[in-house]
Image (cartoon, rainbow, N blue to C red):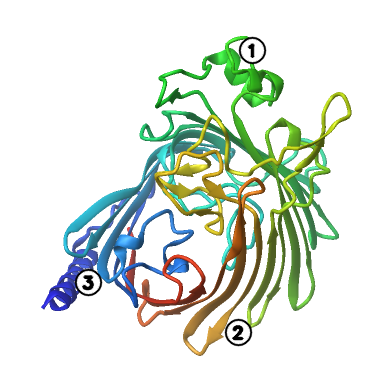
Amino acid sequence: MYMTRIRLIVLLFIAYSSLYSQDFVKDSSKHLVHSLKAEAGLLISAKNRLPIWIKANNSNRFTDESANSAYQILGYQGSYEFIDNLSLTWELESILNIRENINGKFVQANIGIETNFLRLRVGYEEEFFGLNDSTLSIGNLVYGNNARPLPKFSISTNGWKNSPFLKNILSFRAYLAHGKFEQDRFQSGAFLHQKYFYLKISALSKKLSLIGGINHNVQWGGSNSQNESSQPTGFKNYVRIFAVSSGGNDALLTDQQNALGNHLGSYDLRGSMKFKYFTIANYWQFLWEDKSGLTPFNWRDGLMGASIHFKKGKLLSKVVLEIVRTNDQNAQKVADDGTPIFEPDSFFNNGVYRTGWSYHDQVIGSPIFLILNKESISSSRIKNSINSVNIGVAGQLGEIGYRINYIHFKNKGTKNEIIAPSLKMKTINIKLDYNPWPKTTLSTRINYQEANFGSQRNFGLQISYIRHLSF
């Protein structure tokens, strides 16, 4: 009876979205462009929790509580060009999850202004950072889409822009944002500072592309939930965290010795070469934590990936291989007096910002970094010592598009708190898409996992109907 009610709700939603597409009147103004995405589906699991790759890297749309339920997503976005080269943009996305109860939340809600060169946005926005493969990657390690979007104001270039000199060879991309973490955490209401800058060199008639840049994130400010002490804020301290500088007299002693706030970033590199029948790419993201790890020579921890994209490939259009390793963590350091010390750069963790690099108890970076106890406020909350491999393939089987990922990872805990035996997981994720009619997609995702922790062996199935409408 319960599943019958779920099926009825889903069918009614599909019928409503189809009728809505016929009744919506297209705006006659060429300056207004807007679209609607309507999605309805089922989430089925062999256990009372979803397997990892159905819920991961999806901006927290689905959680363990979404297992064996129906869901509905409505996404609306638009833009209005009120004068040449100046547009107002907006985006709103909501999701309803129907299980014993109906729970809803907004995933995205933002408004912005765009020109050909600049883009300003305020609110909650799903963003994609880094130079990884766009479809088959395990995800950006530092700022992925595992957690829901943070509220922030951002200003960025609108895509790649030609340099003032060497225009046909050199281009750049830049981003700067100010955001805020939630109140209900160990360091309540902390701020987020975020920026990146990339340079791209194009050569050999743009067949060769070389990209390099830096991604910088900082948690700063906020009030301690236990003793109500506050971390320094204000413009002069904003300048300090922007420049990765030491704190002033009002900062903690550790921040006066190192850098103000909790810094986390990456150096990103990518090279690609276009051949007649395929494009081959190699990318590298290596991590740094705080001022001590900022040196580019700390290259051992991060993600290395390679991809081949076949231009006319149908049965096989893309292959991706990625390896993640974060076991070194610049742990062996030397004090000012020459004494060797063991002080790892514990990625995503911090002694002051003990909730770690997370938002609403979800790791902001890749989901292979684990939070085992969400109630924990230890400085080793996020388990960050990783070895992982990701193999992905994509292509077309007749009228059905497919993507397959095999991911195997081992999590050893942290350098200071080693888990023995290590946490291990093998998972295979299969996504199938079929377009029976224009702007309509029937999609199926199958995920099977084997692990020695959590729900261990688990099987999940996502079935969805997606309708895209443009006006």
**Residue at (36% x, 57% y) in the render:** 61
CB atoms at circles 1 and 2 under 8 Å apart? no
Q: Amino acid at mark 2?
A: Lys
Residue annotated with mark 1:
248
Left or right for 47, reference 187: left
- At horizontal 60% and vertical 47% (from top left) the residue drawn is 142
Query: Which residue was labeled with disc 3?
Result: 14
Q: Amino acid at mark 1?
A: Gly
Which residue is label 2 attached to?
A: 314
Q: Is residue 30 above or below residue 276?
A: above
Whole-angstrom CA distance, mark 1 to mark 2, is 59 Å
Residue lying farthest front? 420
Mark 3 or mark 2, which is nearer the start of the sequence? 3
The answer to which of 164 and 51 lies nearer the viewer is 51
**SS at mark 1?**
loop
Disc 3 residue type (three-letter): Ile
